[in-house]
Amino acid sequence: MAGIACVGAANWSVATPRPQRGVEIVGAPSNLGLRPLRPGHVPGAWRTPQVLRTHGLAHRLGAADRGDVPAPAYTPVRDPATGYRNGAGLVAYTPLLAQQIGAVLDGGRLALVLGGDCSVLLGSALALKRRGRYGLLFVDGHTDFYFPPHAQTSTAAGTDLALATGHGPAALVDIEARAPYVREADAVVFGYRDYGAPDVVDTERFLRAAFARYPLERVRSLGTSAAMRDALRTLERPDLDGFWIHVDVDVLDPGIMPAVDSFDPGGMQFAELEDALAIALASSRVVGMELTIYDPDLDADGKLAERLIAILERAFARAGLIDVRKPATG
């Protein structure tokens, strides 16, 4: 396995280790939010927890592992009750995933959810709403705030931010009468690059929403670390009980991370994502994080899994969540 020196900036500082808190993994092997890429295709994102474990993620992060929350079987057919593919499965799966995530949070550990597709955000957000008012750091190549007539609205992975903030069928957005799981004003949308594409994004509606917005061009204008520190002013407000980090790996340039279902040009470099995560994870207010959309079917030799794990290992180390005095493994 590659060591942590293969990714990220050459010079980086390490925060004071916080091993007393610990990290605990929850596997969310779900592809329920995705559309098939071709007839008969079953999206491979469900394999992510297994593959990242095989590459030693838990050991390299010093993390405990709670195991997987198995997802219902995938079907490409839209559920007539919700209008979403796998809608009934998502309604059933979300509370189960929320229960496991909640157990980690109640134990005082930082939860690391290994998706699966972006629809696992619903489980994370429901777990948080059961416990109070939390912020959301949404690091994604897309806004995922889509509405009709855009085709993405039938797939929860393309509308997860909208669903988490209360926009969509009640069966998905109001589980346990808890809508919205996250308030728009408590969410930061960071690193996206689909802004202003009228065939995909309802730009006017997105701009009317109360999100704090950091499109990729703004992130780069401010500098990644400075932009994240600015974003934390929203997420560390005293009226919030903490915040959650959502990371869709399609925030990366597909030239360096092609194992995703959406190959839009542009995107962050590995070092930029590492810098952003290192700053966010160093906050005393962060309670957990999820990683989504990586598709092992598109990474036959496992090299991209190694790169993702190296990013996480370095970011967690820089945030003080790993004791870097111990030698890197692999």
Image (tube, grey):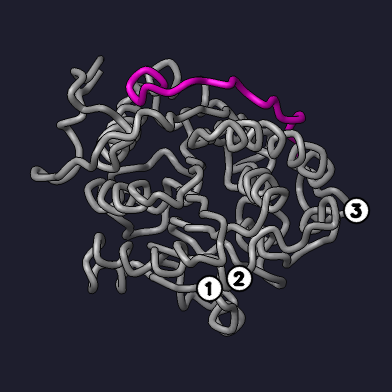
For residue 211, which numbered disc appears in the image?
1
Question: Which of marks 3 and 2 precedes in the sequence?
Answer: 3
Q: Is residue 195 visible?
A: yes
* Res 94 → quadrant: top right
Question: Which sits earlier in the primary sequence, circle 1 or circle 3?
Answer: 3
30 vs 44, nearest the viewer: 30
At label 3, the amino acid type is Ala
- How far apart marks 1 and 2 lie (CA) works out to 5 Å
Q: Quick one: label 2, few (<14), some, or many (20+) residues within 10 Å? A: many
Res. 41 in view: no
| Mark 1 or 3: the one toward you | 1
Is 278 positioned to the left or the right of 72 in the image? Answer: left
Q: Position of residue 58 (x, y in %)?
A: 41, 21
Q: Is residue 106 left or right of residue 318?
A: right
Residue depicted at 37% across the width and 22% down the height: 62
Circles 1 and 2 in contact, beta carbons < 8 Å: yes
Q: Which residues are the magenta region?
A: 58-75
Answer whether residue 71 is magenta in the image: yes
The alpha-carbon separation of the residues under discs 2 and 3 comes to 26 Å
Q: Quadrant of the C terminus?
A: top left
Q: Looking at the image, which residue is at 61% across and 48% down? A: 121
Residue type marked 1: Phe
Instruction: Determine the secondary structure under disc 2.
Output: helix
The disc label shown at residue 81, or none: 3
Q: Residue at 64% of width from left, 47% of height from top? A: 119
